[in-house]
Image: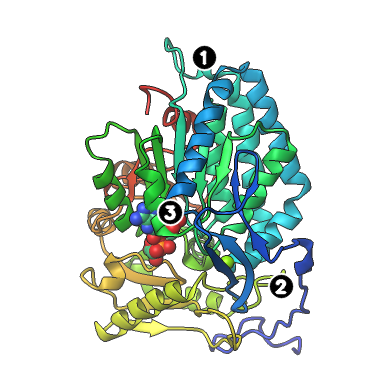
């Protein structure tokens, strides 16, 4: 590029940055051909005699065959957790802290391996797995190690008691991080766990069970039983389970709530979202562009709190969309193991089909699509970064969770209209407000029906900060003192 050429021309030709490939070594995460279930402190063959493949979404190759827990396997895992529950609950709390601390340290030691494992099994960019997922996983265990022997101070005037055996079902978008969000608070509060990872990403949860055993965690305290929806349904409806925690789709969340109705079993649900970024005309525009890009393209947009709608004030909308389009030209889509990759593979063929279907609906309902030119690999599941303008509130792409790298852009004129539009979905998980005015941030935070409101930033996570939704995004909080309450008798 000659010196007199601007780095980004006003025309929309891609900037001429070339990146040398910098591929993380896939063999850092050894993967066996076959995995059993993890029950009672060790790997066992499934009574179901069934296995299913876990696929590497970037290549469509089979990574491993994984045991599928049938009803009698679920039963065995719950019994193992029950047998371990008495001893675990009555140990000195400092002991529980020690195990959690050791697990956190082992995760740090093995974080490169675990990042590669989640990247291969799930398709997320290694940069994100390495720099976001894994540090947060370790932080979650450290944080809860800290609480384990201080529960008496967490809630005034109560004697904190564990619930017993906890059944937990997690999704595939942050495989190890969701396991950490579920397992760490449950163990810290003295419960034992049966965890069902998602069928497309079971490997890191199984490795977490191994790590816990290496840390000396007593058998039965943490059981991991891979399988699909059927296994999940068996687990949440098992009579031996004292509490259910679920993260996944709103549809399945509703089914679980119906199933548990009348049983008196405590339940927490972390479901879908349709997060809105609200960008006011006085916002710091370049930061807002970065925040919006991060909010929707992080993890290919397969994030429950993704900022999948942009509400931008009309006076700055044209300029903002222009900036966004130019920023999209610089996103690198492709091999998740390449450290330069910004947007990796979609998790599964089914998820790709869902995204494709909703994008098709967006086009046919009359919204305008923009996708930067990008070369997608021949094999694997991919979807290019996508913007929709001229979106109206009734469009499916403005209402439904796409769970992909697709941003729907709407405009507003007044703060009141921004609130009305932002709140006009069945969901209420997360939103972002971009403005220079502190008073407006506070007013918006008060008006938005949203579990989390980020101001002039997005996707900030900390184990001390409670996370969860309102409306059809679910109920209950994970993280912080609130997250502990969900695993204690009479508190959740
Ligand atoms: P899903 O809700 O079916 O799967 C999530 C977990 O629930 C998996 O472990 C699955 O095996 C399990 N499961 C499925 N059916 C179950 C049942 N009847 N009882 C108990 N557990 C069950 O979500 P799916 O099909 O993977 O994705 C569909 C859509 O859901 C996505 O496109 C996205 O919109 C949303 N989703 C939201 C997530 C979030 O973090 N809030 C995570 C994953 C998906
Ligand atoms: Mg997989």
Which residue sits at x=53%, y=28%?
A: 83
Residue that carries the numbered disc 1 in the rendered image: 152
> In which quadrant of the rendered image does the N terminus lie?
bottom right
Viewer-nearest residue: 240 or 364: 240
Residue at the disc numbered 2: 338
Secondary structure beneath dot 3 equals helix
Kindly indicate whether the residue at mark 2 contacts the one at mark 1 (C-beta within 8 angstroms).
Answer: no
Is disc 1 surrounded by few (<14), some (14 to 19) or many (20+) residues within 10 Å?
some
Disc 3 CB within 8 Å of nearest ligand 1 atom: yes
User: Label 2: how many residues lie within 10 Å, few (<14), some (14-19) or many (20+)?
Assistant: many
Q: Badge 3: how crowded within 10 Å, few (<14), some, or many (20+)?
A: many
Q: Earlier in the sequence, mark 2 or mark 3?
A: 3
In the rendered image, residue 124, in percent from the top left (x then y), is placed at 59, 66
**Dots 1 and 3: beta carbons under 8 Å?**
no
The answer to which quarter of the image holds residue 58 is bottom right
In-image side of 100 versus 277 (left or right): right
Looking at the image, tell me whether mark 1 or mark 3 is earlier in sequence order: 1
Q: Earlier in the sequence, mark 1 or mark 2?
A: 1
Ligand 2 lies in quarter: bottom right
Is residue 272 visible to the viewer in this orientation of the structure?
no
Q: Is residue 219 visible?
A: yes
Q: Residue at x 49, y 77 (%)?
A: 385
Residue 327 horizontal side relative to residue 427, left or right: right
Circle number at residue 102: none
Could you tell me residue 135's position as x and y percent? Answer: 67, 47
Q: Nearer the viewer, mark 2 or mark 3?
A: 3
Q: What secondary structure is found at the residue carrying circle 2? A: loop
Using the image as rendered, state which of residue 475 and residue 245 is in the foreground. Answer: 245
Q: Residue at x 58, y 89 (%)?
A: 13
Q: Which residue is depicted at the point 26% across and 63% down?
A: 413
Q: Is residue 91 above or below residue 350?
A: above
For disc 3, the marked residue is 231
């Amino acid at each position: 590029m000659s010196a007199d050429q601007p780095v980004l021309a006003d025309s929309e030709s891609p900037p001429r940055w070339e990146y040398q490939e910098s591929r993380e070594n896939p063999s850092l995460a050894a993967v066996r051909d076959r995995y059993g279930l993890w029950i009672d402190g060790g790997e066992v063959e499934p009574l179901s005699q069934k296995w299913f493949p876990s696929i590497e979404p970037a290549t469509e190759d089979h990574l491993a065959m994984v045991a599928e827990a049938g009803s009698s396997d679920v039963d065995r895992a719950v019994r193992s957790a029950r047998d371990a529950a008495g001893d675990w609950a009555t140990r000195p709390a400092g002991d529980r802290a020690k195990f959690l601390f050791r697990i956190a340290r082992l995760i740090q030691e093995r974080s490169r391996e675990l990042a590669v494992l989640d990247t291969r099994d799930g398709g997320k960019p290694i940069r994100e797995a390495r720099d976001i997922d894994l540090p947060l996983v370790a932080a979650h265990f450290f944080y809860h190690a800290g609480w384990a022997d201080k529960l008496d101070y967490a809630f005034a005037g109560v004697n904190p008691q564990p619930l017993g055996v906890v059944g937990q079902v997690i999704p595939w978008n942050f495989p190890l991080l969701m396991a950490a969000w579920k397992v760490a608070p449950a163990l810290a509060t003295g419960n034992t766990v049966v965890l069902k990872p998602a069928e497309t990403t079971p490997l890191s949860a199984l490795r977490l069970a191994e790590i816990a055993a290496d840390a000396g965690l007593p058998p039965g305290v943490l059981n991991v039983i891979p399988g699909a929806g059927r296994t999940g349904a068996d687990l949440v409806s098992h009579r031996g389970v004292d509490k259910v925690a679920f993260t996944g789709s709103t549809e399945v969340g509703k089914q679980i709530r119906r199933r548990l109705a009348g049983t008196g079993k405590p339940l927490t649900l972390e479901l879908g979202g349709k997060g809105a970024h609200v960008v006011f005309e006085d916002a710091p525009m370049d930061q807002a562009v970065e925040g919006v890009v991060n909010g929707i393209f992080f993890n290919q947009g397969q994030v429950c709190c993704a900022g999948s709608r942009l509400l931008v004030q009309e006076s700055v909308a044209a300029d903002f969309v222009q900036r966004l389009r130019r920023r999209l030209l610089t996103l690198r889509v492709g091999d998740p193991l390449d450290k330069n990759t910004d947007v990796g593979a979609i998790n599964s063929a089914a998820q790709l089909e869902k995204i494709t279907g909703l994008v098709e609906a967006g086009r046919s309902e009359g919204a305008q699509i923009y996708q930067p030119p990008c070369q997608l690999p021949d094999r694997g599941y991919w979807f290019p970064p996508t913007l929709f303008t001229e979106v109206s509130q009734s469009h499916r792409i403005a209402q439904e969770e796409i769970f992909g790298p697709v941003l729907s852009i709407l405009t507003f004129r007044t703060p009141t209209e921004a609130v009305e539009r932002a709140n006009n979905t069945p969901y209420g998980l997360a939103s972002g407000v971009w403005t220079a005015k502190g008073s407006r941030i506070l007013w918006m935070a008060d008006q938005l029906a949203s579990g989390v409101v980020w101001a002039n930033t997005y996707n900030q996570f900390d184990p001390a900060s409670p996370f969860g939704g309102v409306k059809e995004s679910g109920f209950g909080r994970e993280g912080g003192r609130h997250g502990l309450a969900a695993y204690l008798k009479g508190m959740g």
